[in-house]
Amino acid sequence: MMQSVGADPEVRAALERVRPHPDAEEALARVSWSVLTEPGDGVAGALIAESGAVSALESALGGGTLAGSDVGGQALSEARARWAPRANAHRVVDAIRGAADVGARLLLPGDALWPNSLDDLGVHAPTLLWVRGDPALLTGAIRVAIVGARAASAYGEMLAGDFAGELAAGGAVVVSGGAYGIDGAAHRAALGVGGNTVAFLAGGVDRAYPQGHQQLLRRIVETGAVVSEVPCGTAPTKWRFLSRNRLIAALSDATVVVEAGWRSGSLNTAGHAAALGRPLGAVPGPVTSASSAGCHRLLREYDARCVTTTAEIRELWGEVVSGGSTATTSDPDRSRLLDALSSRAPRPVLELSRRSGLAPERIGSLLGLLELDGVVTRIESGWQKRREGERRG
Amino acid sequence: MMQSVGADPEVRAALERVRPHPDAEEALARVSWSVLTEPGDGVAGALIAESGAVSALESALGGGTLAGSDVGGQALSEARARWAPRANAHRVVDAIRGAADVGARLLLPGDALWPNSLDDLGVHAPTLLWVRGDPALLTGAIRVAIVGARAASAYGEMLAGDFAGELAAGGAVVVSGGAYGIDGAAHRAALGVGGNTVAFLAGGVDRAYPQGHQQLLRRIVETGAVVSEVPCGTAPTKWRFLSRNRLIAALSDATVVVEAGWRSGSLNTAGHAAALGRPLGAVPGPVTSASSAGCHRLLREYDARCVTTTAEIRELWGEVVSGGSTATTSDPDRSRLLDALSSRAPRPVLELSRRSGLAPERIGSLLGLLELDGVVTRIESGWQKRREGERRG
């Protein structure tokens, strides 16, 4: 039985290293769940929500139907059929030892540092998280996901770096997926300004994926956090990449897609963000660039917000940035009078009235204001615009 | 009095040339209104709507209040004060002769060729239109406004040309403002494919503005139409450019801004389109390009639709374009099974079950389908993915 592994003193010692809490039974049950299931298994999530990880595991590995459960008999028998081939105590032991070997911490729902935002995923929430680095980064400060295509252009990588650097310098935690292209540029920029960054991996936290980001991921572990819901030793697969994307979206206060091809995986992350009601931003680019096509699709089909600056990204979570007001105060009459004035020849009020279509009285009062502003000057019988160089103030 | 000009045989002859209809009194009254007022004068529009152009002109030039009018006494006296300096019969005569000299036609509300879409402007609708070229282009076919910055980039001019050329080749009438930059590129492309294009001018149709577009405007007159609501001899002013923009927006079934600076006049056209409930599209560009900043602003602040292709522009007026489906049919279980399969080593069902987290029965049925699709092959005791080159079909 899988539950029996807790009796092994060596396993207990390894568990102590990944989780120095006196809840070994709960921890072992959840690690068991994580080896039995693929990420986001809704039947497992429902069973655990109903009766807790420990009891649910017993029912799952036992037989018979579950009285009073929302999980129907057929769904349960199908689930048992897919879990059974993995019901092996060695897998649980390997997961814990593998984590202990790389200094990963086991984070469980209910922990003070557990990111409650993940609970918005309902029955698809992760059963646990493996964290290398600082788990405190998953809660507290604003977290913003900067994601995008692996096959990014120089334009996309530059913007990802600019945005991530400025956001991280401002105290936000930059969340991404550790991939080549946009993800890597975002992580690197956050590290570069001494800021915080979190990488969610699709495989185990003991595996550097992609291989070429071994050093980058090592640097993230040092000052940030590398996180996964799958056990150490697990390879990333297409399914696990897609599942991992829901964690990036759910953890983050906002998700920004910097560059994405028409079928980029980051559209999947964006879809999760939209489904969770999280603010979603997309950075536009040239319509001639294939690596911006996905962003334009997000603007068209996902109602993503068009973001072009770091300030606009901050607005996604309601941060109001002062300065750079966009208000334009323009009095149409003033504009019409200015049209009618010349800067070369003085014109009398009646001529200004004919040219502008404004009443002479209105022109009189407007001219007074324009004179105060230093925009016009009276010359003998007429009024004339001052040239730029002559203006006061 | 302004109304007396109709008695002059020479004026009648000129009027006959710009408008071969037996409604000289109505025509003269509306031309009088157009010389008395600046474009979009709401008081004039309200008076004309209430009692017709002829009677309204008499009341406007007379004294006293108007019994039963919605126009209040103060608004009326202010309006009279701004109209009075222009109440000059010579101006009416000049407008008609000027139009006759360049072969312009006078179009009035109620005419068979009058574009009723302009009536959506309510009291700000134009009192008349001067048209050089084919007035039939203002009604009938789909009209799409392609507008944007004068200071356009090569990117913007290329796209304006691509879109306008394809739309015009498809039978749409390309509407724009005759300016340098985006407007000019749109007109030119429409002419280039032998399509139809309409230029709305802020000054009189007898004046080529900008001067550098004299030849372009002459070509538009030959096969398209050059249109204005202000009398011949009238110079374009900033106010008249802004007023002209409402006509472009109201005439067109959709408005597309290709490139625009942060304070570009084409945002004004876009604002009119949005206020009128006309579909509004904005073409994105690099966030590093100042000439796309206005388009991004439209996406953020005006709820403009992001358009990147001619097909997407056509969708603005509900034209559904077939082909290029974006639907992706993906069965998550199939995806998980493909992740678990190798193309180098055959794997038995139970191993595939452990790797994928799918039940062995489910895997059995999926493998059958994948084998039919030629994606997998059975080798001795296991299953293996075929390499791309080996696949059927």
Image (cartoon, coloured by chain):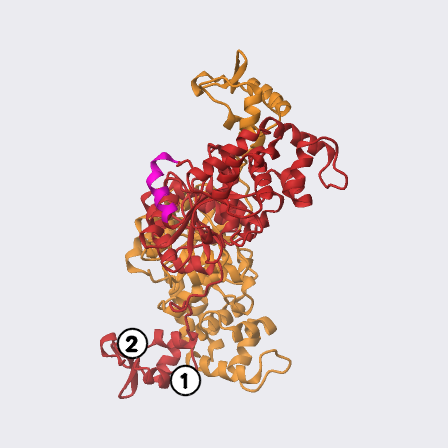
Chain colours: A red, B orange
Instruction: Tell which of B200 and A328 is nearer to you.
Output: A328
> Is residue B26 positioned above or below A20 on the image?
below
The residue carrying pointer 1 sits among few (fewer than 14), some (14 to 19) or many (20 or more) residues within 10 Å by Cα, namely many
Counting from the top left corner in percent of width and height, residue B32 is at: 47, 73
Counting from the top left corner in percent of width and height, residue B353 is at: 57, 25
- Quarter assignment of residue B261: bottom left
The residue labelled by disc 2 is A342
Q: Identify residue type, mark 1.
A: Pro
Name the residue: 40% across, 55% down: A308
Counting from the top left corner in percent of width and height, residue B267 is at: 42, 61
Tag 2 and tag 1 share a subunit = yes
Q: Bounds of the magenta span? A: A210-222
Counting from the top left corner in percent of width and height, residue A358 is at: 42, 79
Name the residue: 48% across, 39% down: A14
**Residue that extends furthest to the bottom in the rendered view of this protein:** A380
Helix, strand or loop for disc 2: loop
* Subunit bearing disc 2: A
Q: Is residue A212 magenta?
A: yes
Q: Which mark is residue A16?
A: none
Instruction: Tell which of B309 and B21 is nearer to you.
Output: B309
Mark 2 or 1 closer to N-term?
Answer: 2
Asked whether residue B157 is in view, the answer is no
> Is residue B83 positioned above or below A52 on the image?
below
Instruction: Tell which of B288 and A224 is nearer to you.
Output: A224
Q: Examine the residues drawn in magenta and state their main secondary structure.
A: helix
Q: Identify residue type, mark 2.
A: Ser
Give the Cα separation between the discs numbered 2 and 1. 17 Å
Helix, strand or loop for disc 1: helix
The residue labelled by disc 1 is A360
